[in-house]
Image (tube, rainbow, N blue to C red):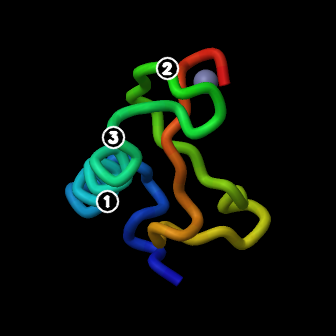
Amino acid sequence: MSKAWAGGSTRAWRTQRARVLRRDNYRCVLCGEPANEVNHRVGKADGGGDDLGNLETLCTPH
Ligand SMILES: [Zn+2]
C-alpha cells in the first residue's frame, strides 16, 4: 500500500503517529497509563497498514 512509509520515520508517519496519540489521549489502550508508543495491531509483515484503524497507543511495557 504505502511503500513510502516502509522506513518507519517519514514525515507522513510522524504525522499519523501524532494523530493516533491524540485520538487515544496519550494513554495506553490496554492499561490506561500515559504512553507515547504507537503500535500496529496487524504488523506490516502480516499486511497491516498505517491507517488509524490499525494503529493504537501503547505504553513502553506493552
Ligand atoms: Zn500499557
Residue 59 vs 53, above or below: the answer is above
Q: Residue at x 54, y 70 (%)?
A: 53
Alpha carbons under labels 1 and 3: distance apart: 14 Å
Q: Residue farthest to the top?
A: 61
**Is disc 2's CB within 8 Å of ligand 1?**
yes
Q: Residue at x 40, y 64 (%)?
A: 5
Q: Residue at x 53, y 57 (%)?
A: 55
Residue 25: give its label: 3
Circle 1: residue type = Gln
**Is disc 1's CB within 8 Å of ligand 1?**
no
Alpha carbons under labels 1 and 2: distance apart: 21 Å
Q: Position of residue 32 (x, y in %)?
A: 53, 27
Q: Name the element at disc 1.
A: helix
Give whichever of discs 1 and 2 has the lower sequence position.
1
Give whichever of discs 1 and 3 has the lower sequence position.
1
| Residue identifier under label 2 | 33
* Residue 30: quadrant of the picture: top right
Q: Name the element at disc 3.
A: loop
